[in-house]
Image (tube, rainbow, N blue to C red):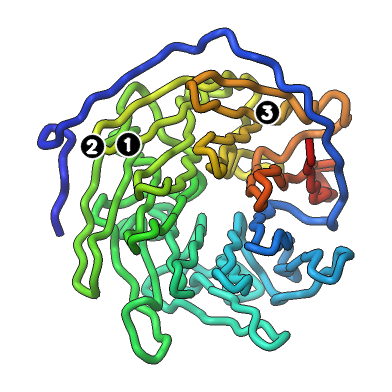
Amino acid sequence: MVKRSIFLLLLFILSIPLQAQDELDLTWTREILGEGIKPALAVDANDIVHAAYITEEQMGGVFYVTNASGNWETSTVSQGYFYGPLDVAVSPEGQPFIAYHDHQSERFDQELGDEVVAILADGEWVLNTIEDAGHDGWDNSIAVDNNGFWHTASIDPVQFNPNSNGAEYATNAYSDDGSYTVENIPQGAQPYEFATSIAVADDGTAGVTYWDSEGQDLIYAERSLGIDGEWLQEVVDSDGDVGRYAALVFDADSNPHIAYYLSEGRSGTIRYGWRNNDNEWNIEDVGIIENLQSGMNPGAARKITSLAMDSEGQVHIVYSDNLKLMYAVRGIDGTWSQQQILNGQDEQALLGTLVEIALDSNDNPHIITYIVRQQRPLQAEILYLTTEN
């Protein structure tokens, strides 16, 4: 494996402090899609919404929701004992893929547990267990490339394995029979909880972002093409405890764009970083959050940032803590405009601090999150929001 150090790159970091910003005034519609937690969202080329969520009880389930028929319909992907967050992606033809962690037992057993990739084919869910040593496959993220192959990133947690491989990558892109391969992304042992994000560029390059717990840095890892491809890694940001809950997309030039968190405990700064055509990283502050929980509580942070790029090259970011959910748009001129679209005090509930955004063919945003109405016993709602303004 080859590790690419920032000291060997032509790397220029442009750090811009938080500026006064414009206010957005959009009208949002909202719908409850079900009772559960830790959802994910994708929108296909025909503007059909594909969502998934999870219940984590020992007799829990993974559920899929879509409006393909014109109305919301929910189906069960699998029943058992699962862990979220999960992730959902769609192929160019609109076929949905869901990645999640299966405990593989009615009780937690650190000798069991793997990632599962579920694929909807001919109206039935086909479950592909990504067998690998250890209780791995946590903090899933999934992407589907232009050829319909799936790619996932997840964590083999050091909490359950002192010899953890840390971040892992799996794909079926390098086989003729649809079988998968699993690779370690060479960064060493990592804990779960702080998210992974994977995206595939138009040229087929797979990129992964995650937080390096040892250095407390934001890592961007990129795999060179081909079955024997190597992982090249960069420290994107090392300014304090930075890089948790990162989300990744590629632009039309196959440059990575990342939203992530600079932590100061329960409060901190949401940041946006991108690599330009000159191989330079640029970093801007987007907003402040002040009420973030970590740990295992139902409302604890898992994926507090998400981003998408529209047809004009504008960046759309959503981010959340337990009391507010924010929507931010970066115009082509570099100006940020924002709107608070959820307020936990108004909801009289905790926001679930997991949020995801996708854009349709008209660049309209579609957002999914969850709201914790009661912590014990857990009662939570999957909330879908959109606007056509």
Question: Which residue is under mark 2?
Answer: 279
Q: Which mark is residue 326?
A: 3
Mark 3 to mark 2 CA distance (whole Å): 30 Å
Please indicate, yes or no, whether residue 136 appears anywhere in the rendered image. Answer: no
Mark 2 to mark 1 CA distance (whole Å): 6 Å
> Earlier along the polypeptide chain: callout 1 or callout 3?
1
Q: Amino acid at mark 1?
A: Arg
Q: Which mark is residue 77?
A: none
Q: Amino acid at mark 3?
A: Met
User: From what the image shows, is residue 81 above or below residue 340?
Assistant: below
- Asked if the residue at tag 1 contacts the one at tag 2, i.e. Cβ–Cβ closer than 8 Å, the answer is yes
> Earlier along the polypeptide chain: callout 3 or callout 2?
2
Q: Is residue 254 left or right of residue 44?
A: left
Secondary structure beneath label 3 = strand
Q: Is residue 227 left or right of residue 364?
A: left
Q: Is residue 144 left or right of residue 211?
A: right
